[in-house]
Structure formats: structure tokens, C-alpha cells
């Protein structure tokens, strides 16, 4: 049986938190991680711009790598383009959307916050998840303007002030007098990169819900469990800007088992 090729896609490096789980579930698979860094951050782009871009970039990635399955490891993209991608391409797509249902089920105080990009929390898709799955919880939507950029800086080993993180996440913490927020959905794949920092910056302890393990289970449901020995081929990361990672970033990526794809000049994706 040939090992599957799994394409993990994000605007940037947040998808690493998903890649880590999927790679642990299917160590025999061949992985390609594609970061659309030329357009990062997606959270500040218009819906029309994103629909067009993801469609174009995905078409080229699928043609180049012929994946068995694609994981859209990005809430900002999944909540907008998943249905279009499934219509256009015949291979399976696994999306990443805010984990509102499990968070609301697990909340004891029934006060849940959803922390995502400004775009994700404004999406009709996210509002429909709340209408369908809030389970009697009071759900607070919080759009973080800079947290994804801070997460990438943290990954590159650059200093990120705890106070800056605290300011971004402060609206998640609602104290209703008799009860207060006990669960925060990490509705952007970048945020688990900051997991310990988020806990340090939180005014009180909460459960941060990271959907990555559930996404890995969904991939295994679709393509089956590991079918052979761990892949000997190194997993590749492809940047749409064509830029090479700095030594610090290359070291962080190597920690995830990812090595930059060279010889793939993708200047055609660069945004002027
Ligand atoms: N990682 C992305 C997400 O899950 C978005 C970050 C961005 O590009 O703004 O939403």
C-alpha cells in the first residue's frame, strides 16, 4: 500500500499545531506543509480577496503535490472557502472551524469565549455554529487583531510582551458576578503556539480548547490508521513568498520535523 500524501495548508505557521497532531497520528504519511506567507495574515483580508486567493493557490498546490487529503489548518480560510473547495476539487478536505460544540458541552459555568481572528469571529459560519451548538451557554466572540502575528514572532524566538498578549485576550474573560468564563476556544491555529503564554497572561485559569487532536482523528477517519513504518522522507514546508526561513525559524521548523522546500520560486503569489 502506498503511503498517503497529506497537504497541510495555512496562511502561515499556525498550521504547525495541526501538523504536529496529524503527523503523530499518521507517521507513515508523506507530508507537505504549505504556508501562504505572501498573504499573511489572512485575518485582515477581505472575503472576496481570500476566496479568490485560496482557490488559486490551492489549485497549484494540488497540481504540484497530488495529495490524498488536504487539511485546511486555518479557521479564517475554512469558515469561508471550505464549501467552495469541496465543490471544485474531488479529493477530501478537512477543515478547521471554531470548536464551539465541544467547548459549550464541557463548560461548567456556561460562559464560553471564542478567540479568533477578527475575520473568523465576524463570519456567518461562526455565528451559525453558536446558534446550533451553544447548548445554553453565553458565548462571547473576541476578534484578536495581532495575536497571530505575535505567535509567529514567538515561534521565531523574538520577544513578545506578556502585557501585549493580555491586552489581546482580555475581552475573553467575562465576570458575570455569580459565574465567569471557564472555557476559551482557540479559534485560530496560531494561538496554541502561545499556549503557555496565554495561560500566563490570563486573569484567571480557564480551559483553552485546541481543535488539533480532533482534526487528526478526522483525518484518520477519512484515510484510515497508520499503515506502515514511519516515513523516511523529510517533511517539506513550502512558503508561497518563495522566501527562505531565517536560521532561527529554520531551527524551530526542524523541531517540528519540517524542512524548507527549496527550488520552488513562488514569486507569482507575492502580493505587491
Ligand atoms: N491560522 C489562521 C487561523 O486559524 C489565521 C491567522 C491569520 O492569517 O490571520 O485562523
Image (tube, rainbow, N blue to C red):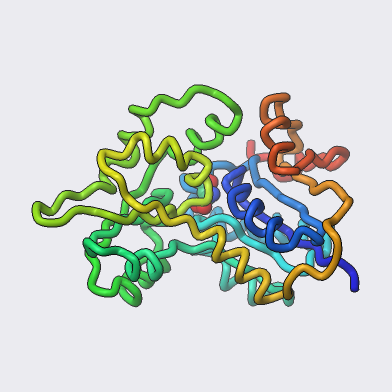
Q: Is residue 255 left or right of residue 128?
A: right
Residue 193 image offset from top left, x and y in percent: 53, 42
Q: What's the residue at 43%, 49% (across, down)? A: 117
Q: What's the residue at 55%, 35% (across, down)? A: 152
Q: Is residue 192 left or right of residue 203?
A: right
Q: Residue 6 appears in which quarter of the rendering?
A: bottom right
The answer to whether residue 175 is visible is: yes
Residue 156 image offset from top left, x and y in percent: 60, 29
Q: Is residue 117 above or below residue 58?
A: above
Looking at the figure, which quarter contains the N terminus? Answer: bottom right
Q: What's the residue at 76%, 31% (across, down)? A: 244
Q: Residue 5 appears in which quarter of the rendering?
A: bottom right
Residue 119 image offset from top left, x and y in percent: 42, 53
Looking at the figure, which quarter contains the C terminus? Answer: top right
Residue 259 image offset from top left, x and y in percent: 79, 40
Q: Is residue 183 left or right of residue 65?
A: left
Q: Residue 114 appears in which quarter of the rendering?
A: bottom left
Residue lying furthest left: 177
The answer to whether residue 42 is visible is: no
Q: What's the residue at 59%, 56% (across, down)? A: 73
The front one of 201 and 138 is 201
Amino acid at each position: 500500500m502506498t503511503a498517503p500524501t497529506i497537504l497541510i495548508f495555512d496562511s502561515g505557521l499556525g498550521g504547525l499545531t495541526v501538523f504536529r497532531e496529524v503527523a503523530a497520528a499518521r507517521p507513515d504519511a508523506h507530508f507537505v506543509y504549505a504556508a501562504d506567507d505572501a498573504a499573511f495574515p489572512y485575518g485582515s483580508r477581505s472575503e472576496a480577496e481570500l476566496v479568490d486567493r485560496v482557490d488559486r493557490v490551492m489549485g497549484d498546490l494540488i497540481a504540484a503535490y497530488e495529495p490524498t487529503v488536504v487539511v485546511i489548518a486555518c479557521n479564517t480560510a475554512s469558515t469561508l472557502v471550505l464549501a467552495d473547495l469541496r465543490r471544485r476539487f474531488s479529493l477530501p478536505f478537512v477543515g478547521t472551524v471554531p470548536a464551539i460544540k465541544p467547548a459549550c458541552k464541557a463548560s461548567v459555568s456556561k460562559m464560553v469565549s471564542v478567540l479568533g481572528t477578527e475575520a473568523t469571529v465576524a463570519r456567518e459560519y461562526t455565528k451559525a455554529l453558536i446558534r446550533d451548538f451553544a447548548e445554553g451557554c453565553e458565548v462571547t466572540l473576541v476578534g484578536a487583531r495581532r495575536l497571530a502575528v505575535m505567535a509567529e514572532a514567538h515561534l521565531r524566538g523574538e520577544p513578545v510582551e506578556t502585557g501585549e498578549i493580555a491586552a489581546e485576550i482580555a475581552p475573553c474573560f467575562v465576570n458575570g458576578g455569580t459565574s465567569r468564563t471557564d472555557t476559551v476556544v482557540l479559534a485560530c491555529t496560531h494561538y496554541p503556539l502561545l499556549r503557555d503564554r496565554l495561560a500566563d497572561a490570563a486573569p484567571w485559569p480557564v480551559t483553552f480548547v485546541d481543535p488539533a487532536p480532533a482534526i487528526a482523528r478526522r483525518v484518520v477517519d477519512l484515510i484510515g490508521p497508520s499503515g506502515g513504518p514511519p516515513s523516511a522522507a523529510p517533511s517539506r514546508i513550502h512558503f508561497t513568498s518563495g522566501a527562505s526561513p531565517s536560521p532561527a525559524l529554520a531551527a524551530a521548523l526542524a523541531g517540528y520535523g519540517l524542512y524548507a522546500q527549496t527550488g520552488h520560486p513562488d514569486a507569482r503569489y507575492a502580493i505587491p
